[in-house]
Image (spheres, coloured by chain):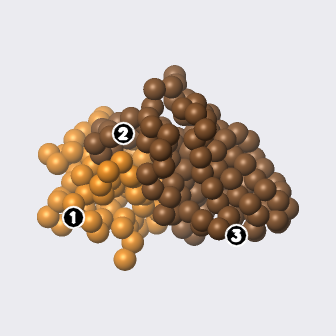
Amino acid sequence: DARVTQTPRDKVTEMGQEVTMRCQPILGHNTVFWYRQTMMQGLELLAYFRNRAPLDDSGMPKDRFSAEMPDATLATLKIQPSEPRDSAVYFCASGLGGSGAPAYGYTFGSGTRLTVV
Amino acid sequence: RKEVEQDPGPFNVPEGATVAFNCTYSNSASQSFFWYRQDCRKEPKLLMSVYSSGNEDGRFTAQLNRASQYISLLIRDSKLSDSATYLCVVNPWTDKLIFGTGTRLQVFP
């Protein structure tokens, strides 16, 4: 089965440090999403790309978060500097988009569990 | 008002029971609708899409009411393995998927 691969699986870091999360979307998928999940807020869309171009990053705190797709096989989400309130599970998802969400939805990676102390 | 709202539960039901979840959405122009399932400490996985005419997949039935802007999921003959959080998902426009906060289901023996 094709999978979305995320690394690292878990990350514990100190406040103020830079954190980089990586995602390898499913080969051939042209749309990549970054979501953040917390108990209080549920799944929040941070940013998404189509054909590597950022389409929407309105859900992302711009002062400390950045998302990029250096190539079609890699998406990155960086937090600099990190803060305790950034502690959450960060999911990447990919799919084939272009005219609305496909009937089969999108496939999620297993997530990066971030703890900022 | 949240774009997608769900009762967080938990719904505690015995094996074999029928249980139903509802979800409401705020954007009347929404195009696509889904139910995802999320197990504890796992990623969300697509359970089923929701079509205007309603659709069934084994013990699961999904329905959409556009006039009232709600989606439902019915699970018949609940199994222990159905215990999970069920996420209502709406595609308001373009490719974005907006998730509800989920309804937790616990099936007991």
Q: Is residue B49 left or right of residue A60?
A: left
Residue at numbered disc 3: A85
**Above-or-below relation of B31 to B56:** below
Residue found 17% across the figure and 48% down from its top: B52
Q: Disc 1 versus disc 2: distance between alpha carbons? A: 21 Å
Residue type of the residue flagged with mark 1: Ser
**Counting other residues with Cα less than 10 Å from the Cα at mark 3, is it few (<14), some (14-19), or many (20 or more)?**
few
Residue type of the residue flagged with mark 3: Arg
Q: Is residue A21 left or right of residue B10?
A: right
Q: Colour of chain A?
A: brown
Q: Quadrant of residue A105?
A: top left
Q: Are marks 1 and 2 on the same chain?
A: no
Q: Quadrant of residue A75?
A: top right
Residue at numbered disc 1: B28
Q: Position of residue A99 (x, y in %)?
A: 28, 42
Task: For mark 2, name the chain.
Answer: A
Residue found 64% across the figure and 50% down from its top: A77
